[in-house]
Amino acid sequence: MSYYYDPLNPKCKSCRGGVSRGSEITFHILKTGGEEFFSATACYFVFYKDGEVAREIAMEKRDGGFILTLRFNQIGLYFYHFRLVGSPSARGDASIHFLGCGELRRGRLGDTPVSWQITVYEADYETPEWMKGGIMYQIFPDRFHKSGDGKLASDKILRKDWGGIPCYKPNSYGKILNNDFFGGNLNGIREKLDYLKRLNVSVIYLNPIFEAYSNHRYDTGDYMKIDPLLGTEEDFDALISAAKERGMHVILDGVFNHTGDDSRYFNKYGKYQSELGAHQSPYSKYSDWYHFKHFPDSYDCWWGIDTLPAVNERSPSYQEFIFGENGVLRHWLKHGIDGYRLDVADELPDFFLQKLRTAVKTENKDAIVLGEVWEDASNKIAYSERRKYLLGHELDSVMNYPLKDAIINFVFSANTAMLRETIAMLIDNYPKQTLDCLMNVLGTHDTPRILTVLGGKYYENKDDMAKAELTHGEKTEAIRKLKMAAFLLYTLPGVPCIYYGDETGMQGFQDPFCRRCFPWDNQNEELLSFYRKLGEIRSEMLAGVFAEGVYREVFADRFCLVFERRTEECTVYVYVNNSHGKYTMKTDETLYEYLSGRTYRKTLELDAYSYGILVKMQ
């Protein structure tokens, strides 16, 4: 190709990723050497704002290429490509070609262009600095650690076999009740904070802790009350205080799209006797929180699950309850938490997310608002509407499921293509402040355990899943792959998040098998030591560069990827070789590798199935 454009190359585009309102961007198509099959005499910048008609602007010809500077004054998504016009070549090629987005976002000539994206966000859009460069740890409270014994209502089961298989079979009515509890609690978490500190954890993300019927607690019963099995409000305050003493932040799961049917607000079973719930009476003060198709037993619910009645987010009283001065969000922020992870953010309307952000930031401008979004959050369409998550009025950042899938793909396939493509997409489409706060995961409470995934086994029958374990050989190979995956998670842009127990080799297929109890008496010390080493390098030795260092790909082929993370003060080189071959690279610098402690002079050797973090020695 005789024309070159790469939006991640500063020679082609003056900025990377999203830009603030009012920014000027210079676009520069470069003329390259090599055989010329098409010579353009003119070039037009073709662009449109999302939902509007496309426009064209002529570009200035310079050094055989074309250049244009344009200011973007409105927030939103813009899409663009280039139209090149010239005389046909001697071989009779067409006189018009389009330059659009190809592999790794780089320009590709063709008859049908794929547009690049520009995300223009509000000028005052900021995200919390304390999040950047950190390490998150996700805890499913009932299964992490328990201190003392709890008591339950008669319709719940308190398990005495810590580490046993969670109940997974439906009852006689075909429902899985999720009413067995192992007794993990807030004091148990507090007792293990020093364990988390050794992993260099800086952010603890707790799955729901509010009163609820089920063990997962996504069926909220009372937003203003800690579930009694987890402890008291005093226990919660003690946990927050102890975490802060260790430099840790705590964020809570915010479940605001639905409640439980066995809740104070819906009260289907009359458990809450102090007031009428929406299911009990159309005159309940909570009636407009829900939509009944036929009162009282036909109502909107989350994904058709009748134990999770969907909330009407337009209800003024519900909004006041969540966003008000004495509402849910501010109540727990006053207790010292540092933000929320929002469950099913796709199903919360934009206006609701905007009000939510305002309430959170009014109470604590440094609190974080993270959304559960499984796709590219910059251009997500949900329920036929383009979402506005990252334009400055809604989310700080999101869960990074695209990167999870790409890392797993690379570890399995030994092919860098999907990984490189995903990294390029995230850098090109996301605001930098969003990118640096991404919640990077390999597994969560909604996915099978990463070690099980990397073990390669698959079962459809839950009885088989319940008793499945990797063989010694399968586990050894899965751990090797997990180390490589975790290494990438810790070195790529964003914040790595450990799902409790992954660092010690927990296994399990999807819910509920991925939610088993932490094996405190049976930890994989080799894997745990590796996670601790990664945490030490990331948080203590090279904190600044992994907090906000710019990513640049240095070298890549099918099996190997070398990239740098750079700030003004420091440059780190990261490599991963997922092949049985060795790579030898020349260098003019003396480099120190942090994982192995090796020093390289003149020649850098990347051993088979190896990875490393290199810095220039002074």
Image (cartoon, rainbow, N blue to C red):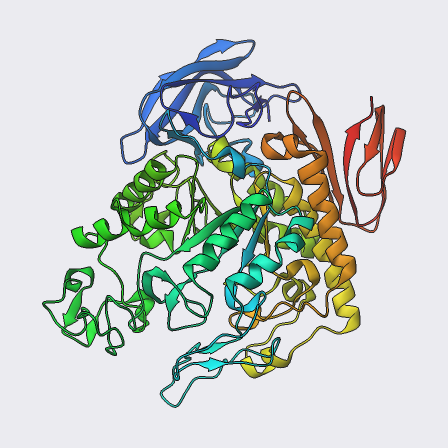
Most distant residue in the left direction: 283
The structure residue drawn at horizontal position 69% and vertical position 25%, both measured from the top left corner, is: 570
* Point 63% across, 62% down: residue: 501
Identify the image quadrant of residue 165: bottom right
Residue 141: horizontal and vertical position, in percent? 51, 64
Observer-nearest residue: 163 or 92? 163
Left or right: residue 192 compared with residue 320: right
- Quarter holding the N terminus? top right
Residue 401, given in percent of the width and then of the height, sits at 52, 51
Image quarter of residue 75: top left
Across and down, in percent, residue 259 comes to: 30, 64
State the residue at coordinates (31%, 28%).
54
Can residue 291 be seen here? The reply is yes
x and y percentages locating residue 581 in the rendered image: 84, 47
Front residue of 61/573: it is: 573
Q: Is residue 411 left or right of residue 316?
A: right
The front one of 67 and 355 is 355
Tag count: 0
Residue 315 shows in this picture? no
Instruction: Reply above or below: 507 against 567.
Output: below
Classify the position of the C terminus by image quarter.
Answer: top right
Q: Is the residue 169 above or below the residue 469 in the image?
A: below
> In the image, what residue occupies the spot 36% across and 19% down?
22
